[in-house]
Image (cartoon, rainbow, N blue to C red):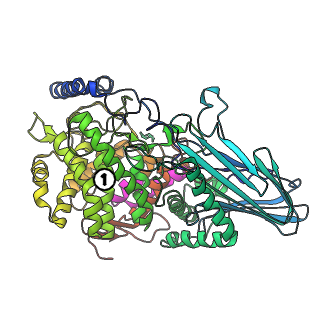
């Protein structure tokens, strides 16, 4: 919500509203056409041999042999917006707009013509509605015209996107219904708005409802699609009528329940999650607005614990508000997209971004928020099993650099960002963490095992013997968006090693050792991707001398430091020193998520000062006035990564132990000094 005085807008987001996928022209989940499989396999062998002989290959050359046009990938779409035109705002004074993080309530208030007006906005998980209450402290003062705006692009080329062709119908009792199907893939959508006025008059206007002279106005909105997270069709199969009835019943139920009860249930539901973590850095709470607080923070060189606390809790608010069971995981913009052609399609990038969204989930005691992520990865594993057979003839499952809600687990051809088979094991790792935190063996057996085992199986097949030393390496291997294709880049090896270790640990808990003999054999032969170069830095590529880009935003070779645990100052001090040198070499800059990543790295190097310096850097240089992270433009991963970084400064888990205040600090305002070992007791 924008909270504008005369014309306010509420942007509507529903994460399943995507173009592309089944129903769109030529969609094949990114798989090769059957007729090409043989020649593509030959191309893969050519790439492998070239890399073995020459040491590396240019990404463009690999993409031309293995890539293909991105067909039917699609993009996240805007669900339109509600526009509200308010009467009687002339001469308004005392305007305030706020977001209460403790209750997840947004408010606008002002005084005009001797009347105080208040608008309150919420998005309720229990009732599945957005609700809004517009009230005044004197009777008969609220007059507002609410219309549904398709938020269609003004460009003729894009006029078939989003809800551009939606049918909008109004009803005399205050309803606005929106119906249609996306032009691209036939995905059905429906939205309902119900406007209840206390007193006053209600009339229909084009695409909306006008209320005049009411004591208060309550609005409920809900929207949905016939999308279902289930490979291969991704549809509920319901009729347009059934979809309409499903959405209408939510809005009717909320309206019958009434705003006060919807609000009470929303606040209780939210607080049950949010209240689990209190961060008290002994700071006086902020009394200024966020833009002023940011300006002051920059001016003081970042010494405001209150703003840092707020920023931390804002990340938890964003996660609770964009990732609840029964829907898709938070995409690149969470649920705050405003376009039909958002940056990177507001998709699921799996070379760090999607994973980073969930870094703070368990460590912030928000296990409920991981449910959409786990469900999503489980579905990727189903789609990706067909892709692994198609693309490689491998067992297990695959997904590459980026994907969609429609199981796009194959290939496209953006040379510097198309190849990342490690995404399977990295996303699967979320299942292991879930088990480590929850300790639920049935979950491990029934849900985690197939996904973890499938990822490990893929890597058993994908690795091949390195002629340089006889170890098992990934070939081709690509360090995300950086350098050439080589064999055995650090990130590939670290992730594959972790995938093996995880599945072996899970097998031993579940009594399935016999099923993982091949994994154990591969683990014994794998190159673990942890090598120190002649320059004292951790190697990003196996061979010394590969030319990288100074200060590249991805620091992929540090995976084992975080989110992995194989490289740590206590267990592997030399490697940790090399990681530290590498990090210093990369510098303290980067895009938002890149800096957020470094907060976590420094925390895991047990250097609280440097972790805090990175956080300061982010808040000072990569934060919009509303505290969203700047990529640019807005990308939510940085917010989540920074919240995770604060958690990691305060509490870390490693192997079987938990360290409290592990990241020693001597900066003003902190009272701890020195690094405690991860096994130290609290
Ligand atoms: C990765 C990053 C980019 C961007 C994109 C969405 O590919 O390298 O910086 O964040 O994801």
Q: Position of residue 451 (x, y in %)?
A: 28, 53
Q: Which residues are magenta?
A: 598-620
Judged from this view, the residue extending furthest toward the right is: 113
Residue 642 sits above or below residue 470 on the image: below
Mark 1 lies on residue: 428
- On the image, the x and y values in percent for residue 642 come to 46, 56
Residue found 55% across the figure and 54% down from its top: 301
* 236 or 650: nearer the viewer: 236
Indicate yes or no whether the magenta region holds residue 486: no
Relative to 602, 329 lies left or right: right
Q: Secondary structure at mark 1?
A: helix
Query: What residue is drawn where x is 51% and y is 48%?
Result: 226
Query: Is 119 in front, or is 68?
Result: 68
The residue lying at 55 percent from left, 68 percent from top is 270
Q: Which quadrant of the view contains residue 114?
A: bottom right
Disc 1 residue crowd, few under 14, some 14–19, many 20+, Cα 10 Å: many
Foreground pick, 8 / 511: 511
Left or right: where 485 falls relative to 130: left
Q: Is residue 60 above or below residue 629?
A: above
Could one spot residue 610 in this view of the protein?
Answer: no
Q: Return the x and y of residue 425 as percentages of the image width and height.
A: 28, 49
Q: Quadrant of ligand 1?
A: top left
Nearer to the camera, 532 or 476: 476
609 drawn magenta: yes
Task: Name the residue: 40% across, 55% down.
Answer: 373
Number of marks in picture = 1
């Amino acid at each position: 919500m924008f909270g504008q005085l005369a014309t306010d807008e509420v942007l509507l987001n529903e994460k399943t509203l995507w173009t592309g996928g089944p129903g769109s022209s030529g969609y094949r989940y990114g798989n090769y056409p059957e007729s090409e499989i043989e020649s593509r396999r030959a191309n893969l062998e050519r790439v492998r041999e070239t890399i073995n002989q020459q040491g590396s290959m240019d990404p463009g050359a690999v993409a031309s042999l293995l890539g293909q046009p991105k067909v039917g990938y699609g993009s996240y779409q805007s669900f339109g917006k509600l526009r509200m035109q308010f009467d009687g705002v002339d001469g308004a004074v005392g305007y305030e707009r706020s977001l209460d993080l403790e209750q997840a309530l947004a408010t606008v208030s002002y005084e005009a013509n001797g009347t105080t007006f208040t608008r309150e906005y919420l998005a309720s998980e229990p009732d599945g509605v957005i609700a809004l209450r517009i009230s005044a402290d004197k009777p008969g003062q609220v007059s507002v015209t609410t219309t549904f705006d398709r938020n269609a692009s003004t460009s003729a080329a894009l006029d078939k996107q989003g809800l551009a062709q939606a049918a909008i119908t109004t009803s005399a009792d205050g309803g606005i219904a929106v119906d249609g199907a996306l032009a691209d893939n036939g995905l059905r959508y429906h939205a309902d708005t119900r406007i209840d006025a206390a007193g006053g008059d209600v009339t229909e206007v084009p695409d909306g409802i006008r209320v005049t002279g009411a004591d208060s106005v309550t609005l409920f909105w809900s929207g949905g699609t016939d999308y279902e997270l289930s490979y291969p069709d991704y549809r509920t199969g319901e009729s347009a009528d059934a979809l309409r009835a499903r959405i209408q019943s939510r809005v009717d139920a909320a309206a019958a329940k009434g705003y006060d009860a919807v609000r009470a249930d929303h606040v209780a539901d939210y607080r049950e999650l949010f209240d689990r973590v209190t961060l008290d850095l002994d700071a006086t709470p902020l009394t200024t607005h966020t833009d002023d607080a940011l300006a002051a923070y920059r001016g003081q060189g970042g010494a405001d614990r209150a703003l840092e606390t707020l920023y931390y809790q804002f990340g938890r608010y964003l996660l609770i508000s964009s990732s609840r069971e029964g829907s898709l995981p938070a995409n690149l913009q969470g649920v705050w997209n405003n376009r039909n052609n958002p940056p990177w399609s507001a998709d699921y990038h799996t070379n760090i971004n999607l994973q980073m969204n969930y870094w703070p989930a368990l460590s912030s005691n928000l296990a409920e928020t991981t449910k959409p992520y786990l469900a999503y990865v489980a579905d990727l594993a189903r789609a990706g099993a067909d892709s692994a057979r198609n693309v490689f003839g491998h067992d297990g499952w695959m997904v590459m650099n980026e994907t969609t809600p429609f199981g796009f687990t194959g290939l496209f051809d953006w040379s510097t960002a198309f190849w990342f088979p490690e995404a399977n094991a990295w996303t699967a790792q979320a299942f292991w963490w879930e088990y480590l935190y929850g300790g639920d063996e049935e979950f491990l057996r029934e849900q985690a095992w197939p996904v973890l085992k499938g990822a490990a199986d893929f890597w058993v097949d994908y690795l091949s013997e390195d002629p340089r030393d006889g170890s098992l390496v990934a070939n081709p291997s690509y360090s995300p968006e950086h350098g050439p294709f080589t064999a055995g880049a650090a990130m590939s090896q670290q992730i594959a090693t972790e995938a093996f270790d995880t599945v072996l640990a899970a097998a031993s808990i579940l009594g399935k050792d016999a099923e993982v003999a091949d994994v154990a054999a591969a683990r014994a032969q794998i190159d673990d991707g942890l090598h120190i170069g002649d320059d004292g830095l951790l190697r990003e590529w196996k061979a010394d001398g590969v030319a990288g880009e100074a200060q590249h935003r991805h620091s992929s070779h540090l995976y084992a430091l975080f989110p992995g645990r194989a490289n740590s100052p206590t267990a592997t001090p030399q490697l940790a020193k090399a990681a530290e040198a590498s990090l210093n070499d990369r510098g303290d800059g980067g895009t938002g998520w890149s800096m957020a990543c470094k907060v976590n790295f420094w925390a895991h190097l047990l250097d609280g000062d440097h972790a805090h310096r990175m956080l300061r850097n982010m808040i000072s240089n990569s934060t919009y006035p509303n505290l969203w992270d700047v990529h640019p433009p807005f990308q939510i991963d940085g917010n989540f990564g920074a919240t995770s970084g604060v958690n990691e400064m305060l509490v870390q888990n490693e192997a079987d132990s938990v360290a409290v205040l592990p990241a020693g600090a001597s900066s003003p305002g902190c009272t701890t000094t020195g690094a405690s070992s991860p096994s130290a007791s609290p």
